[in-house]
């Protein structure tokens, strides 16, 4: 059974390109991952498929209404069980590799993208199980953040990356940044590839990589070493 991600949004087209190329597309082609985009407007109210409304108490901007979101989520829940219903928002828990690892162990998740001024608080209180931010800045909507979530989860699902080692040696696994990498030629415009990498001495190469990773992490992200 494939890992299934349902994404609910008022702008689903925004995610088509990132989710239809590269490793994510390959995972879908292999049948390991299924991503289904849902247009919230299909669940909108009345002739104009209304999904949002003005803020109670006054104030600028529009808020996504309860009805379309509850209807869409409940329809999906009638078809299968979901491990998490995630809301992408700037005030959620800040996303990191540890959360990506946890989410990669689930089977079915729903991601709800916010838009406008946000969503009715009752959706957050009664439907959402996890709120995630991709960083301390505000996007126009949750779509790009949802695509980032899907991509980062996808590469951790067993069988997606052919050389499984490769996801395990990504930056942030073990709270370390990745060491530098080189390819041919061994010398370019006088710039040489470190000798040890050409030595064929596996233990020495590993030692060099560990020490470079530590150096870079100390220099750029000392906070990771304190965790
Ligand atoms: N929607 C708007 N800004 C966001 C952010 N930083 N992370 C996740 N979703 C968002």
Image (spheres, rainbow, N blue to C red):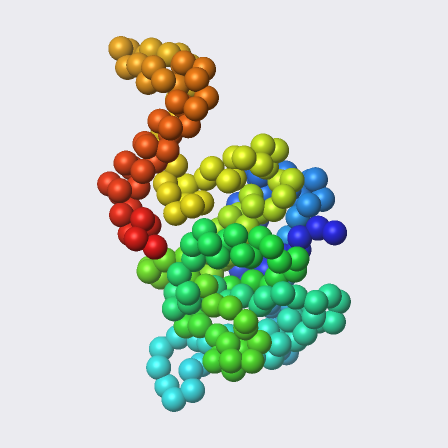
- Indicate the quadrant where residue 81 lies: bottom right
Q: Is 214 above or below relative to 185?
A: below
- Indicate the quadrant where residue 42 lies: bottom right
Quadrant the C terminus occupies: bottom left
Relative depth, front residue between 42 and 155: 155
Q: Is residue 79 visible?
A: yes
Counting every numbered tag in the picture gives 0
- Indicate the quadrant where residue 43 lies: bottom right
Q: Is 106 above or below relative to 67?
A: above
Relative depth, front residue between 62 and 227: 227
Q: In this rendering, would 22 be left or right of 79? A: left
On the image, the x and y values in percent for residue 9 come to 55, 63
Q: In this rendering, would 106 be left or right of 190? A: right
Q: Residue at x 52, y 52 (%)?
A: 101
On the image, the x and y values in percent for residue 69 come to 59, 73
> In the displayed image of the protein, which residue is found farthest to the left?
219
Q: Residue at x 47, y 37 (%)?
A: 169
Q: Is 205 above or below relative to 184?
A: below
Q: Is residue 13 visible?
A: no
On the image, the x and y values in percent for residue 57 come to 38, 89
On the image, the x and y values in percent for residue 195 come to 34, 15
> In the displayed image of the protein, which residue is found farthest to the bottom?
57
Q: In this rendering, would 57 be left or right of 34? A: left
> In the displayed image of the protein, which residue is found farthest to the front?
203
Q: Is 125 above or below relative to 158?
A: below
Q: Residue at x 74, y 71 (%)?
A: 78
Relative depth, front residue between 57 and 224: 224
Q: Residue at x 45, y 45 (%)?
A: 173
Relative depth, front residue between 138 and 41: 138
């Amino acid at each position: 059974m494939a890992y299934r991600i349902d994404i609910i949004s008022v702008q689903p087209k925004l995610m088509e390109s990132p989710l239809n190329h590269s490793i994510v597309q390959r995972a879908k082609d292999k049948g390991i991952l299924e991503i289904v985009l849902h247009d919230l407007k299909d669940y909108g109210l009345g002739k104009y498929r209304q999904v949002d409304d003005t803020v109670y108490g006054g104030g600028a901007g529009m808020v996504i209404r309860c009805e379309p979101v509850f209807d869409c989520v409940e329809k999906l829940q009638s078809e299968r069980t979901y491990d998490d219903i995630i809301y992408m928002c700037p005030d959620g828990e800040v996303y990191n590799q540890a959360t990506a690892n946890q989410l990669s162990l689930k089977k079915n998740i729903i991601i709800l993208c916010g838009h406008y001024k946000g969503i009715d608080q009752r959706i957050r209180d009664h439907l959402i199980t996890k709120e995630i931010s991709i960083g301390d800045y505000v996007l126009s909507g949750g779509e790009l953040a949802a695509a980032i979530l899907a991509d980062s989860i996808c590469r951790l699902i067993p069988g997606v990356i052919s050389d499984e080692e490769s996801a395990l040696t990504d930056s942030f696994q073990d709270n370390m940044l990745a060491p530098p990498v080189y390819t041919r030629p061994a010398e370019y415009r006088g710039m040489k590839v470190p000798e040890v990498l050409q030595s064929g001495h596996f233990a020495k190469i590993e030692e060099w990589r560990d020490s470079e990773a530590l150096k870079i992490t100390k220099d750029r992200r000392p906070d990771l070493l304190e965790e």
